[in-house]
Image: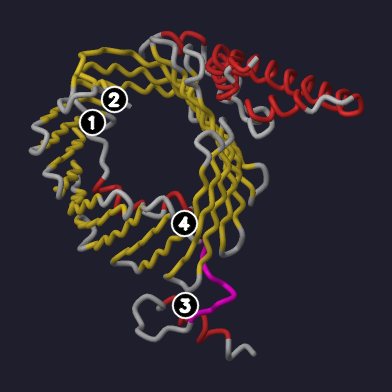
Amino acid sequence: MADLLPPLMAAQVDAKTKVDEKVDYSNLPSPVPYEELHREAFMSLKADNFEGLRFDFTKALNQKFSLSHSVMMGPTEVPSQSAETIKIPTAHYEFGANYFEPKLMLIGRVMTDGRLNARLKADLTDKLIVKANAQITNEPHLSHAMFNFDYMGSDYRAQLQLGNSALIGATYIQSVTNRLSLGGEVFWAGVPRKSGIGYAARYESDKMVATAQVASTGAVVMNYVQKISEKVSLATDFMFNYFSRDVTASVGYDYILRQARVRGKIDSNGVASALLEERLSMGLNFLLSAELDHKKKDYKFGFGLTVG
Amino acid sequence: MAAKGPLKLKFKGKTTKGSKGGSTSTSSSSSSSVSSKFEVIKDWTNWSLKKAKVATHYGLIPLIIIIGMNSDPKPHLFQLISPF
């Protein structure tokens, strides 16, 4: 019996380098949460480009509690009927308080116009996590809230979502082998009465991640990320909707350098964008963002500073 | 009653306009007590969710600050206000 254990342990340690490793099906790793399925691809391809000035100051009062002050000035888009985008310059200040503890995380942000954005994450037991996310405004009927209950099993995760205006969803993801995980989701929305079902698959190794997701709303998303080295990774993505026949393909990169991080992408809709985050000194980060939409002739540039 | 705007509340499976119309139209003597109890429960949940929304809107940030100021090491009140 003791002779059997060392070869299996050695096989698991070298699992990623050997070609034919032994898979221990009773001891698979926990899969990524369903909503983070496309996490690596979206880090390069969906970086948060912004327009205007952004200044964030985070002040830590102690290890668990911090306050944040954020100023944003710039044009914001207003939805309009005509084909041109209408931008109105706005400025706002947002005050936030964060409390982080291993078992409880509370984040609240309030803006000058009275909008509150709140997030809560609490570990009820070591397998059950409850998360809540709410946006409350002074205007009636525009607030919404979402509660998620996550259960983490040994090699699967299940989640139940409840939202206001009668939104119920459930997702489940299971590790099938060391590298492959498969999952599915179901949702039912009360106000526009519709329900949907979707499936997802994720295959990862230590050099690449490939995911695919199909939903009954007609959306198909497939992406592939290759980690070329510690500093460079490239990603590509293909989204299409088989009801509305919209197709988008994009290619992006993510360079993590010692003092800076550059992420950029180019799209089949004629959008090229990039985001630079540079660490000027300890705790001081400088951000530059650019997004050029050649099809709609909309060019956005932003710069910002993050302290703390 | 229909313009009460129940859209933003969680338990809307029970309180959409269709079910309200349905419960008042089937008013026989035996089911009227059940439907009125139902109405009372719906009104109570509407009222409590409205109050919870107002309480969260005004009270969440003060709550986080109170929890944070009582965590250890206890920060000083001056640190809350000053920019250093």
Ranked by sequence position, the earlier of labels 1 and 4 is 4
- Please state which of the two labelled residues, at mark 1 or mark 4, is closer to the viewer: 4
| C-beta proximity under 8 Å, tags 2 and 1 | yes
Side of A12 relative to B74 (left or right): left
Dominant secondary structure of the residues highlighted in magenta in the image? loop
Q: Residue at x 15, y 25 (%)?
A: A84
Q: Which residue is mark 4?
A: A198
Alpha carbons under labels 4 and 3: distance apart: 32 Å
What residue appears at the point 57 percent right and 18 percent down from the top-left corner?
A: B5
Residue at point 48%, 24% (across, down): A135
- The numbered disc on residue A285 is 1
Magenta highlight range: A23-30
The kind of residue tagged 4 is: Gly
B36 part of magenta stretch: no
**Which residue matches tag 2?**
A307
Gap between marks 1 and 4, in whole Å? 39 Å
* Camera sees residue A122: yes
The front one of B82 and A264 is: A264
